[in-house]
Amino acid sequence: MGRVTIEPAVPQEHIDLLHAGVTHPRSTFWGMQGNTSEQSRAAFDEIDADPHHTARLGRVDGVPTFLTETYDPAHSVLAAHYRVEPGQLGMHVLVAPTDTPVHGLTSQVFRAVMHFCFRDPAVTEVVVEPDVRNHAIHAKNAAAGFVVDRRIALSDKEALLSFCTVEAFAASERASGSGASERRSGSELERGCPVLGGEGLPSPDVAHPEPEVTARAHRHVAAKAIGEFTHERLLSPEPTTDGRWTITAGTARYTFAATRHALEHWRVDPASLERTVDGEVTRVDALTVVSDLHEDLDIPGHLRSTYLEELSGTLASLAYKWHHARHTSSELVHADFQTIEAAMTEGHPAFVANNGLIGFSATDHAAYSPEAGADVPRVWIAVRRNVAHLSLADGLTEEDLYAGELDPADRERFSLRLEAKGVDPADYLLMPIHPRQWDHKLAVTFASDLARRDIVHSGRTSDRYRAQQSIRTFFNRDRPERHYVKTALAIQNMGFLRGLSPSYMAATPAINDWVAQVVADDPELADCGFRVLREVAAIGYTGDAYHQLGASNPHTKMVAALWRESPVPKLAAGERLQSLTGLLHRDADGGALITELITASPIGAAEWVRRMLRAYLRPVVHCLGVHDLAFMPHGENLILVLEDHVPTGVFMKDIGEEVVVMSDRPLPADVERVRHVLPAHVQSLSILTDVLDGVLRFVAEILADDEVMGGGEFWTLVAECIREHAADHPRAARLDLLRESFEHSCLNRLQLRNTLQMVDLTDPEGSLIRVGDPANPLHNPHDFKEMRPEMREGAHDLKEMRPVTREGAYDRWRTGG
């Protein structure tokens, strides 16, 4: 075909050629139709300035003929969709469209480009991501040795992620330039393409559901189910003559060993769990546990399959985490914040079905879940101002927000995109969205809004983000000083659709300002190292048909986002971060992170626990006891600050959605929606339920089972922390946190009752299910001792293990007659 040469594209010199090629009507899949010359120039200037992306002009006998680009996949949008390996090189190619095509030219150009890519001995594999509709290029790729790996959703297309090794290319017909595929018929071309051959697309990575790993996951979840359902008094295990326990469900019988702890907490040993039917041993299956026990669990018939789906997702997630386990707990002691965040395995400690993620595909999970540890680019849209709302923290302007979160080049590019659509950029607000949300919701469910230009896709930014444990919140890995970004995500998880309501969030910055001021003005909280991460801006789109219905519905929560402060700029030298979730973490081999932290610290276990309680429990009690202010201080809502592996303070987050003022104290008008006036004994449940039952009972179990600290000593330290605070702040004593017993709010019962909506957010208090009054381990903590299997001979059943009210005392956990 002539002599092929490839040279760097110089936008200043070559823009006319480049612009003509990418905007030609036949270059549809290049995605730049409608660009002005200035916009094309800006796009190629951006590539020219990117050290990881290069555009080149190709000539045949000196005549400009094609454009090719190469890029580092690790610094591209593809890094969010698969684990980039060394030696991989991304590639694009565009042969200049013409009305007089030359037969075989495209194939020869493709061959030359592949030889050019592999000229560098460091390159061992070429990566491409063509549009699924571009059947012509699929055939070219197949002929060159490319193999389709999976279908992925990018912001501007659905693509086929494909790979070609140097060996595959060398063995292909394209390497020698035979052009054999050009001589085939169209049908033969399709049969030669692995994408179109009737086999369908290859599955995404699902290596984790191996028999051994999945069997372990089933035992773990089944054991947790029996323990937590017993904790909530849905089940009543009976003792056996050999020191074990048993539950009967129809013809099925479960037997197991367990340790019992304060707060009616059961730790069922997964390895000991055995299921028999009519005396025959069967495999342990967590889904079957729910089916066997459905009468005891009282799940509405029409929701049983939905609950099983959430449980299946939890099993798959756990198997994935164990299969891909990268770090032991001893290694996490020295790991950075995001490594620890990605290593967490359990999710919410009390919920059995705690990681269902209904709606997430296997590809989504590998791309966007926190445990995948994948870098996720941020997709941005522009929404018309007159049908959107942006609320900002006091003193923060719109310009401040965007200048802090976007580079000038990004903002300029977004403006050019809007101008290319024929609209005025000044009429729009900019909003980050989840990549999956763009593909699954905005591009389809909001197609009319896109057509009206009320929503305009703006593009991606180069900053790489990591998903946090809360799944829809992202941390900026490249620039940690920039804000967290929390975006609406249309998946179902733990009883809620994970959207964000624009109307509800309108007051979020004002609420955060008020809470932050209360915290900042209190010397006690400062002394404890207690701080909040403000949600400084919230944005939501309301111009869709779903808002016009006039009633709240899931679709009104699909296009919204907020920005939350990052803790990183607030750290002092020597301080590290770790989610509170880490204190409850056991790795794939059973090692506990809290045990490793205590071992690595320069202080003993008792002093370590005292300091943890001073950083975590004392300020939470203080906020409620002194300011009538309650948070939701469970694992993912609270970040520990560690120094020498010892907690020295905390950051509280998720303020706008979770905070409650429980008295009639004066509030600013735009903060009024967080007020829920409750009597003191009900207020105290936000500590007794959310902290003691929701967090500390699991900490106590781990420390006891690892023989670091017994339950009596642990609960004594907790009680001392509360007594010391009440002595310093007498008003807090009204909460009576050391009382004999308290009402038990049951979380799994909520999910079992309605897995689609556990709580009515308009009446959260009225939605709760409270069953029983467990003995409070703070009342007389030395009376609480772990009951291990060797102690159980003749033990009474659970119904007899309840507090009997007496003057100033309660019954001990009874281990004998």
Image (cartoon, grey):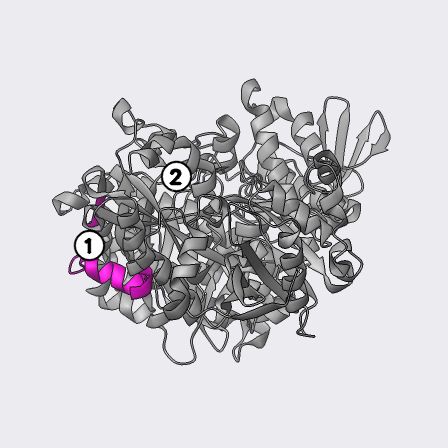
Q: Is residue 33 visible?
A: yes
- Residue, disc 1: 514
For residue 336, which numbered disc appears in the image? none
Residue 205 percent coordinates (x, y): 68, 48
Note whether 713 is above or below 213 in the view shown: below
Q: Where, quadrant-wise, is the C terminus in this rendering?
A: top right
Which amino acid type is marked by label 2?
A: Gly
Per the image, the residue denoted by label 2 is 499
254 over 607 or under it: above or below: above
Give the quarter of the image for residue 591. Answer: bottom right
Q: Amino acid at mark 1?
A: Trp
Q: Nearer the viewer, residue 274 or 625?
A: 274
In this rendered view, identify the residue nearer to me: 369 or 519: 369
From the top left corner, tell me how far across and down residue 43 is, in percent. Answer: 39, 60
Q: How many circles with numbers are drawn on the protein? A: 2
Q: Specify whether 641 is left or right of 370.
A: left
Magenta region, residue range = 389-410
Magenta stretch contains residue 391 = yes
